[in-house]
Image (cartoon, rainbow, N blue to C red):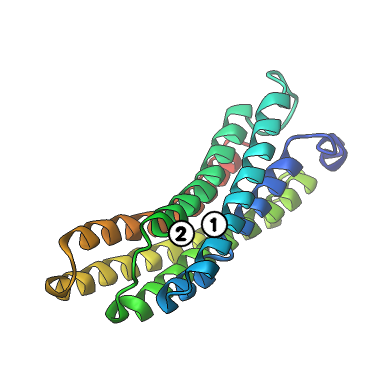
Amino acid sequence: MINLSSMFAKSPFKPLRDHMDKVVESVAPLKDFFDALHQGNYSKVEEIQQQISLAEEEADIIKNEVRNHLPRSIFMPINRRDLLEMLDMQDTIADVTQDIVNLLTLRRMCLPTDLCQELIQFVEKSQQVCYMAQGLSQEFGDVLESGFGRHEIDKLLKMIDEVSNAETEADDLEDALVRRMFDIEDSMKAVDVVFWYKIFELIGDIADYSKKTGNRLRLMIASN
């Protein structure tokens, strides 16, 4: 019987997990960033922005290493294209996180007090979805080591469903937040409404692309 664990010892999948860990490192400070923004602590805002940018740059380095060194013809139970697409989805999470903090730092936008509680809740939920997606990478390693055993596959599919459900909850929070902003938009500058709407979309993208990494794993399983 082929030992899939040893076959993957020098495979791109560990760097793929390392990349996701670095993506999570970029997402983790996001709540603290919004807390600092609400408090008007712009020195802290800039400090966290630089921290997130560094994590995003390091994620890019890992991404490029995986792309450059992944053989075009490899004997693996998963498709090379699927690996690269999953890598891109993971990387987009770090990209949009950097976009969020860069935009808010450059424009020094003020977080409306009436939106603060709901926005922080939305950020935390999107972070949670990302953390759950990180767990999928480790679980997929167990699936590989088991030779795609039924028990391990069932556990991973359940986790993928949980990520999808959590992303739906994030969508609901985003919808509620947008409605709340529209309720108070007369007290806001019109340009601020536009900018905050864009920020909400980007925060939602963190959860959305986290779900997409799970969907890609589901396709990998279905092809075996």
| Left or right: 126 in relation to 152 | left
User: Can residue 156 be seen by looking at this rendering?
Assistant: no
Q: Residues within 10 Å of mark 2 (few under 14, many from 20)?
A: many
- Residue nearer the viewer, 110 or 181: 110
Q: Is residue 177 left or right of residue 41?
A: left
Looking at the rendered structure, the kind of residue marked 2 is Ser
The image quadrant where one finds the N terminus is top right
Name the image quarter holding residue 74.
Answer: top right
Identify the disc placed on residue 164: 2
SS of the residue at dot 2?
helix
Disc number for residue 168? none
**Residue 219 image offset from top left, x and y in percent:** 53, 40
The quadrant holding residue 50 is bottom right
Residue at the outermost front position? 43
Q: Nearer the viewer, residue 55 or 205?
A: 55
Query: What residue is shown with label 1?
Result: 160
Residue closer to the observer: 144 or 127: 127
Q: Are marks 2 and 1 in contact (CB under 8 Å)?
A: yes
| Residue ID at (50%, 46%) | 95
Residue furthest top in the image = 73
Residue beneath the point at 40% across and 70% down: 122
Q: Secondary structure at mark 1?
A: helix
Quarter of the image where the C terminus is located:
top right
